Amino acid sequence: MQKVISKDGTQIAFDKMGKGPALILVGGAFHSRSDPRMTQLAKLMSKYFTIYHYDRRGRGDSTNTQPYAVEREVEDLNALIKDSGGSVHVFGMSSGAVLALHAAARGLDIKKLALYEPPFNSGDDDARQVAARYTKQLTLLLSEGRRSDAVELARASFGTPPNIIDGMKQTPVWSMFMAVAPTLAYDNEIMGDGSLPKKLIASVIIPLLVIDGGASPLFMRNAAKAVGDAAPRAQYRTLDGQTHEFDPDILAPVLIEFFAS
């Protein structure tokens, strides 16, 4: 484990592995350096790239300076870019994909950007009302210290069936989820009302690959396609049979092809 110091003094912990051009992995909600799926992806990619796999602020071994703002997380990513020597590739997962879009739009030294299922909604009135209710409920649960309930709310909002949530509660993963539950508020702030920020995406002029899973819910696939349509230099690709819980062995070759070309 290594650490860099972000602009506001937050310590950002990361693992560095492999050889080649620098590639930073940005996790989504609940993800940290201990996430097995992202860890396996990092190992596969490290055969071709120098991988920076980091704990976003408030997770794992990273600290959590207050108050929170999306700009602070952009600064965290910039600290990693500077540590790498500058000019990196970035892969963002879920809300981490949206964070990566913010970073690219703000001019960080990113050469290419790949995104997996940025979870935007349809942007209509119903969707905005659902997002507002989620924000209100999440804020209340976290303010009362009800981490398990906050995790359950978030998992349900992702479309996880109740029986799967009940099963998760009986496994060690639930404790891992509860440990990072306060950072669900950060992912929620990154997403805003969940609608597609077309102007921001249109300002991202670097090569962009947007990926979705062919077995993912339709709203996820629609969101990925919309991001691809809004970006000036985007490719859009569907991985047959994949869901939001992607298989690293299937995703890695696609990323390697894009970043190495």
Image (cartoon, rainbow, N blue to C red):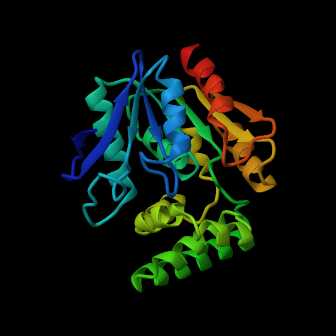
Point 32% across, 53% down: residue: 72
Point 72% across, 73% down: residue: 162
- Residue 144 position, x and y percent, is 41, 86
Residue 143 visible in the current orientation: yes
- Residue 258 position, x and y percent, is 61, 21
Residue placed furthest toward the left: 9
- Residue 202 position, x and y percent, is 59, 39
Whether residue 43 sits left or right of residue 220 in the image: it is left
Is residue 125 shown above or below 21?
below
- Along the line of sight, the residue nearer the viewer: 235 or 242: 242
Residue 128 visible in the current orientation: no
Is residue 12 shown above or below 151?
above
Whether residue 123 sits left or right of residue 180 in the image: it is right
- Along the line of sight, the residue nearer the viewer: 236 or 93: 93
User: To which quarter of the image does residue 53 belong?
Assistant: top left
Image quarter (top left, top right, bottom left or bottom right) of the C terminus: top right
User: To which quarter of the image does residue 134 belong?
Assistant: bottom right
Image quarter (top left, top right, bottom left or bottom right) of the N terminus: top left
User: To which quarter of the image does residue 151 belong?
Assistant: bottom right
- Residue 79 position, x and y percent, is 28, 38
- Along the line of sight, the residue nearer the viewer: 6 or 197: 6
Point 59% across, 52% down: residue: 197
Total labels drawn:
0
Whether residue 89 sits left or right of residue 245 in the image: it is left
